Image (tube, rainbow, N blue to C red):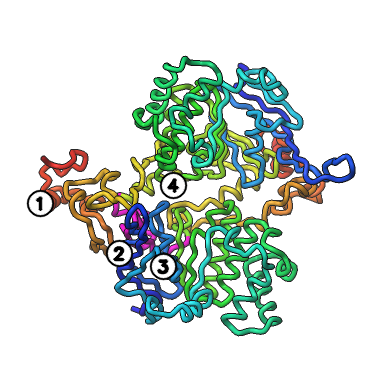
Amino acid sequence: MSTPMLEVTDLHKHFPIGTKGLLGKPARWLHAVDGVSFSLERGETLGLVGESGCGKSTTARAIIGLYPPTSGSVKFEGQEISHLTRSERAPFRRRIQMIFQDPYASLDPRQTVASILAEPLKIHRLAKPRERKLRAMQLLDAVGLNPRHIHRFPHEFSGGQRQRIGVARALSLEPDLIICDEPVSALDVSIQAQVVNLLEELQERFGLSYLFIAHDLAVVRHICDRVAVMYLGKVVEIAERDELFGNPQHPYTKALMSAVPHPDPRVERTRERIVLEGDVPSPLDPPSGCRFHPRCIERHKVAGDLCSTVEPQLDTRSACHLTATATAAASI
Amino acid sequence: MATPILDVQNLRVRFETHHGIVRAVDGVSFHLHEGETLGLVGESGSGKSVTNLALMGLVPQPPGVIEADRLTYQGRDLLTLSDRELRRLRGNEISMIFQDPMTSLNPLLTIGRQLTEVLEVHKKLGRREARRLSAEGLDDVGIPEPQKRLDQYPHELSGGMRQRVMIAMGLLCKPKILLADEPTTALDVTIQAQILELMRRLQESHGTAIVLVTHDLGVVAGMSDRVNVMYAGKLVETAEAGPLFEEPRHPYTKGLLGSVPRLTGDPDAELDSIPGAPPDLAALPPGCSFAPRCGFQVARCTEDIPTLFELPTVQSERRSACFEHARLGPTLIADTRGRLNGLDGNPDGDPNEGTPA
């Protein structure tokens, strides 16, 4: 097998909370990402889903180097990039780009579109000043905006158009991998569909790989080839899209899917729902054993106190004592 | 038929701004019956939240101006009530849940203080009794340890918890009408499922009528009896939930439903997005506001403003504000061509051919 485009192994990111003592040691550590592993092939889209606070955005930021990871490895085409210095990282930065959630906050309001799109080229010294403008116009055209609008400012565009500018900026350095952090969740549905279609079209055209972070499972199902489900800093299930949506294994995945309302009254009135109890526990004080066990409705199926004492490991598919026993039983 | 609890006829809300007059709500009519849930759907800026605020008299005037041919709650004209009388209704008989519990709860007061205040003001209860009922209210919405929560401040609770406090507050006086403005939009799906379940249960036990404002078509599908679809301040389609989702009769509704990614069906099919963006309310296009984005456009659409046409259906009342609504119906496809051509004078009868010369 060829080397994957991106390989993340046992990634941890812990944040210090408060201080104690004279030396200002952190009082506690918040384990935002706690041992995440996955890989991503060229041209593939991997979805990273989960609820707020599950660590999906922190994972993305640790990969791209916005946060230095606490431990673990991030390999890009086989090369370790997690502990590089700023200058060592530069060539990789060009090849891994990011699209952010909020199209209002992620564009500098005082720069014209031309200068927003030319800036990455300037920093990486990829084009002469005159070529940059032409390149900016080509980028606008590629994302479906009028190239004549390059001298406009972000406020002159609607939310959906701004998100297109964000996409154009990510494309400007001709990256191989784009990390999309909730790229459509701030947009209205009709505009959301436009941006989803655009991302798919660009992937085909430029052979891009996406790490697609979202909380909307329906969007993820639409755009991703494989999906990893996160809960409290850990991946609880990872599978091919059709496998995951057609036959979810982990009780959390099942509950998450069941919670998504279907835009069809007949389905909505009749389908059985799994309604989880309580909230996601604080990552400062995660439950013992399996982190999902206090909310899990299938817990009674596992004998003894296994779920509350022993942390299940992610096998090839899911991190659950229940599925582990099922697999073990099947293999005997 | 029973008299509606809320009757809204030709509601108009406009704001006089520096950029001109913004007609945020432009001629909206509907009624609401006891125990019914009415979904109010549309994208940002369609006027759905302002409609709700206007019902409660919460649109600041000026710059806002609220007008209506009729706006009555149980036969009482809401537009002529004094501030004092309105205050007596608000939070008591008509209450509201807002989208963002972080900004709608007072951060300086304990949960208990904010809940008991409602009961002390509206029901003239004593402190102790109000506190007891508040704890019960929290328990009803599934908040563990309600007594302890009463002494906590909003920041000590999680988002889902705060939203539940908002709902408990909205339901404390057992209102006749609950105006819920995106009550679950800020929440994660598993918490959203809990809150929706809760609203369904409470509606069953109290017979509360709900106006549910949301942009989430899935939530609407699961909750509403009837649905109003709004676009650029106008009602463009109204129908019972089932028929609306099954067979939308306005191009905008059809477009919205096509744009939603789903958990069922072919995941690789391209989404039918609606081209363009919603119009600027201060500079609406002539004719139908949706015409510039519409695939069913004919010459007339850019000249006349369509009113809500009553559609002949076997089911209950159904209306669409589209000249071409018949073309979206299934039964009429075969024989409409001729009729339509006669109607709008477009000899081609093809929407994509554009306007005849």
Marks 3 and 4, how far apart at CA:
29 Å
Q: Chain of mark 4?
A: A
Mark 1 or 2, nearer chain start = 2
Which x, y percent locates residue A249? Answer: 63, 42
Marks 4 and 1, how far apart at CA:
37 Å
Magenta residues span B223-251
Per the image, the residue denoted by label 4 is A188
Per the image, the residue denoted by label 1 is B342
For numbered disc 3, what is the local secondary structure? loop
Q: Nearer the viewer, residue A130 or A10?
A: A130
Marks 1 and 3, how far apart at CA:
47 Å
Q: Is residue B76 magenta?
A: no
Per the image, the residue denoted by label 3 is B61
Between tags 3 and 2, which lies in front?
A: 3
Q: Chain of mark 2?
A: B
What residue is at 62 percent from the left and 38 percent from the top?
A: A57
For numbered disc 4, what is the local secondary structure? loop
Picture layout, residue B128 above or below residue A326: below
Between tags 1 and 3, which lies in front?
A: 3
Query: In this rendering, would B179 be left or right of A95?
Result: left
Q: Amino acid at mark 1?
A: Gly
Q: Chain of mark 3?
A: B
**10 Å neighbourhood of mark 4: few (<14), some, or many (≥20)?**
many
Marks 3 and 2, how far apart at CA:
18 Å
Cβ–Cβ under 8 Å for marks 2 and 4: no
What residue is at 51 percent from the left and 44 percent from the top?
A: A185
Marks 1 and 2, how far apart at CA:
29 Å
Mark 3 or 2, nearer chain start = 2
Cβ–Cβ under 8 Å for marks 3 and 4: no
What residue is at 10 percent from the left and 49 percent from the top?
A: B345
Per the image, the residue denoted by label 2 is B27
